[in-house]
């Protein structure tokens, strides 16, 4: 079981990392042709688009996951109905997104506003939820290679297109938008044939409205839940912009946040690999096994995030050839360590999502987003971008651990020790923030001890399983 989980996590995790690693190697090239203003414009537009992206699927991905497990012989009919409904809905979503992008594009980019709108929405208008249906299908069928191959191919293509448009064509921030549009169209095309033809999951447009309303009653409460992730991780750029923080400062913060995003991707990979396994254990109420997996994930995250933070100053000095951007590594450390909330969050949220008690998630995610917004508006006038860093960290910690104190989770008869894990996360974050300034000898010693200890424990653990 653990070997399968590890192999699937590696497939899901490494597939996006391979192009991202390539992306790190081209940073010395493209950062010569980019400014903080470019990062600021792209970050602001991306932040606002992400603000409504959760509306694109209306939370119906939860119904896709649960119906696959709960109704294994009838899920295809349910999926086809959702496919048809979302295809129609995505046209309305495109209209909403058009108005938002036109309204928020910074003055420095207003001449390209309609092109930015078109490049962001063309894949959605042409293909609707095709990519969503394809990814969930292969994930629940435990065929991670199908997703990983696409991730690697189109990830590498994105990097090459970024290099071409930014450093060869000198398009600045517009290079990102062109690359995203082209790759979005090609990705959807790669899913369209197997989903619509091979596996016969063509959309049904004469779906039963009564059934869809029942689905939406369950799925819509998850929209604020997913939206809270946006508020915590992305909206800070919009708030910084609205509170007149300079676009250059926002660009530096956005750049540092990219490194936290690398570990968020690892969290997504773990979630993708473990979701079918968790659903099986939830069905049999084997919470002891769920806890075991969660704890393994948490220890893995601690090791990887700490070691990355320990060496981040040297990593930035090698990869980043823009002096202003290279000085943002302290921000990146906090944002990387904040992602340690993710494994423990799986433990509480998974129980609630599988039980379809979705309204209760608002006590976790919605309150976390409120905390983030309040802290941002209160502290940004005094601390600038560091207020956004602090609010992101605090909100993620709340989201990761508060779910364990809900009544719905207390019905689980297996203790998860959330306060001990939270304390460990806080201590490790403080240590990482200061340890980055240690001399090379101490850093090498720490890395050696942690690596040897980790390999020994991993070998012992897997042999026992």
Image: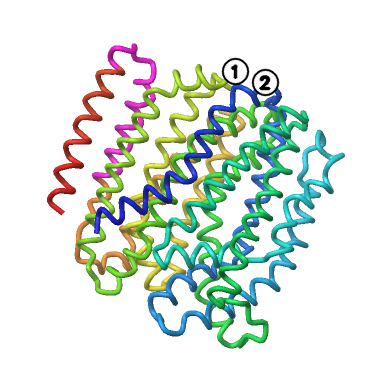
Residue 266: image quadrant is top left
Is residue 427 or residue 353 the one in the foreground?
353
Which labelled disc corresponds to residue 32? 2
Mark 2: secondary structure = helix
Q: Does the magenta segment cover residue 414?
A: no
Tell whether 248 sits left or right of 296: right
Residue 448 position (above or below residue 153): above
Which labelled disc corresponds to residue 321? 1
Tell whether 463 sits left or right of 156: left
Q: Position of residue 445 (x, y in %)?
A: 25, 18
Outermost residue toward the right?
111
Q: Residue at x 39, y 28 (%)?
A: 309
Q: Residue at x 26, y 69 (%)?
A: 411
Assess disc 1: are there few (<14), some (14-19) or many (≥20) residues with their C-alpha within 10 Å of its C-alpha.
some
Q: Position of residue 369 (x, y in %)?
A: 52, 51
Residue 36 position (above or below residue 459): above
Residue 33: image quadrant is top right
Is residue 406 or residue 287 the one in the foreground?
287
Q: Which residues are magenta?
A: 420-442
Is residue 203 or residue 168 the one in the foreground?
168
Residue 382 appears in the figure: no
Please report whichever mark, 1 or 2, sits nearer to the chain's N-terminal start.
Answer: 2
């Amino acid at each position: 079981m653990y070997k399968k989980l590890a192999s699937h996590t590696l497939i899901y995790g490494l597939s996006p990392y391979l192009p991202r690693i390539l992306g790190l190697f081209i940073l010395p090239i493209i950062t010569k042709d980019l400014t903080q203003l470019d990062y600021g414009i792209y970050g602001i537009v991306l932040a606002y688009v992400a603000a409504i992206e959760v509306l694109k699927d209306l939370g119906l991905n939860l119904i896709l996951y649960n119906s696959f497990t709960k109704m294994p012989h009838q899920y295809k009919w349910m999926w086809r109905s959702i496919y048809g409904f979302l295809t129609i809905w995505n046209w309305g979503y495109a209209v909403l997104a058009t108005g938002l992008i036109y309204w928020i594009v910074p003055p420095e980019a207003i001449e390209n506003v309609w092109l930015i709108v078109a490049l962001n929405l063309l894949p959605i208008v042409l293909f609707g939820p095709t990519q969503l249906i394809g990814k969930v299908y292969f994930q629940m069928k435990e065929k991670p290679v199908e997703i990983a191959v696409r991730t690697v191919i189109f990830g590498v293509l994105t990097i090459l297109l970024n290099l071409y448009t930014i450093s060869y064509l000198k398009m600045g921030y517009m290079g990102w938008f062109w690359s995203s549009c082209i790759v979005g169209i090609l990705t959807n095309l790669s899913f369209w044939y197997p989903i619509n033809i091979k596996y016969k999951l063509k959309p049904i447009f004469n779906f039963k409205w009564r059934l869809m309303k029942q689905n939406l009653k369950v799925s819509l409460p998850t929209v604020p839940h997913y939206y809270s992730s946006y508020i915590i991780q992305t909206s800070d750029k919009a708030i910084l912009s609205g509170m007149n923080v300079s676009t250059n400062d926002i660009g530096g913060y956005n750049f540092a946040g990219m490194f936290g995003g690398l570990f968020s991707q690892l969290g997504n990979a773990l979630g993708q690999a473990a979701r079918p396994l968790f659903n099986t254990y939830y069905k049999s109420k084997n919470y002891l096994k769920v806890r075991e997996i969660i704890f393994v994930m948490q220890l893995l995250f601690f090791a990887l995030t700490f070691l990355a933070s320990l060496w981040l100053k040297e990593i930035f000095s090698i990869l980043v050839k823009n002096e202003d951007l290279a000085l943002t590594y302290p921000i990146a450390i906090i944002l990387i360590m904040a992602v340690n909330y993710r494994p423990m969050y799986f433990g509480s949220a998974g129980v609630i999502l599988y039980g379809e008690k979705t309204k209760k998630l608002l006590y976790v995610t919605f309150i976390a987003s409120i905390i983030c917004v309040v802290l941002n508006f209160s502290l940004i006038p005094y601390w600038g971008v560091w207020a956004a860093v602090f609010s992101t960290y605090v909100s993620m910690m709340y989201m990761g651990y508060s779910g364990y104190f809900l009544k719905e989770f207390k019905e689980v008869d297996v203790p998860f020790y959330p306060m001990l894990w939270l304390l460990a996360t806080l201590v490790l974050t403080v240590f990482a923030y200061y340890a980055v300034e240690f001399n090379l000898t101490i850093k090498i010693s720490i890395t050696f001890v942690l690596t040897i200890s980790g390999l020994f424990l991993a070998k012992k653990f897997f042999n026992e399983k």
